[in-house]
Amino acid sequence: MSLVKAKKHLGQHFLTDKKIAAKIVNGLVHTNQYQQVLEVGPGMGILSDILLERTDLETFLIDIDVESYHFLQNKYPHLGKRLINGDFLKLNLSQIFDGKYAIIGNFPYNISSQILFKILENRDNVVEMVGMFQKEVAERCASKEGTKDYGILSVLIQAYYNIEYLFTVKPGTFNPPPKVNSGVIRLSRNNVETLPCDEKFFWRTVKAGFNQRRKTLRNALSGVVPKDKMDSHPYFDKRAEQLSVADFITLTQHLTQLVQ
């Protein structure tokens, strides 16, 4: 089989270190909660080789790259419909899985935020995610309040998932090597089925707060709640990065009362 050529427009950087690949796959630790896993962007299958050896998992692969798809068809002819040529961001996951599952991958850097939002959209069924991202994205996801990296993704992910930064990967373990370090994180679904507030309003509040992160929330949220309806609640005089996930839930509850 001829090797797949990495395509810049797809953000492909193929991992070449099998030890790193094994560490990523071994990051899936909550397999008592699911039996199926979807690998996004398998490329030439360095993670897939290890995933398919695991008898506790039924592995599915999706790759948008037609060349990778045909390569993997030849490599894993037994997969059949479990090998998908398509765009993960447009995939209707409920048509493939009817229960809980995990997602894993060495994700393209250019769509990493969109991948995380897709996982959040499917949070009721995505029990676990182990993924490699650009290091600064991985760190941003794991950041806590009061830090410069803390933002929209940090709050939304941590509202629904426990997050662990597992390890850093150097550029030399890829072909072609990226210009930055990579970071591997694990998301594990927490016990909160639904937040104790209006969830759509929570998302809107978080996004509005960070979209003008240098302003106090009194000013940043003026498009969400008119200023004349805001009261003396102490959170209004803080900036978004100063509020924890629990604080944002409390703030959303308070804002809901103000707009009623």
Image: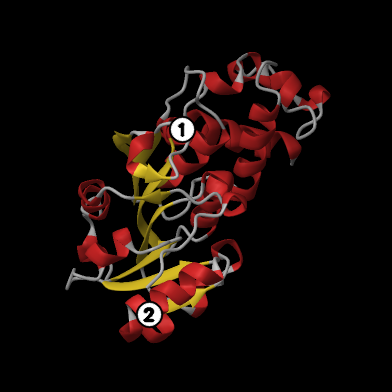
Tell me residue 238's x, y (percent).
60, 15
Mark 1 highlights which residue? 246
Horizontal side, residue 10 vs residue 258: left or right: left
Q: Cα distance, mark 2 to mark 1?
A: 49 Å
**In what element is the residue under mark 1?**
helix
The correct choice, above or below, for 236 with respect to 130 in the image is above
Tell me residue 90's x, y (percent).
61, 66
Reading the chain from its start, which is encountered first: label 2 or label 1? 2
The residue lying toward the viewer, choosing from 33 and 84, is 84
Which residue is drawn at the image coordinates 31% and 50% (left, top)?
Answer: 16
Horizontal side, residue 204 vs residue 126: left or right: right
Q: Residues within 10 Å of mark 1 (few under 14, many from 20)?
A: some
Which residue is drawn at the image coordinates 46% and 60% (left, top)?
Answer: 41
Mark 2 highlights which residue? 74
Visible residue check, residue 250:
yes
The correct choice, above or below, for 187 with respect to 59 in the image is above
Which residue is drawn at the image coordinates 75% and 38% (left, top)?
Answer: 259
Mark closer to the observer (2, 1): 2
The answer to which quarter of the image holds residue 248 is top right
Q: Amino acid at mark 1?
A: Ala
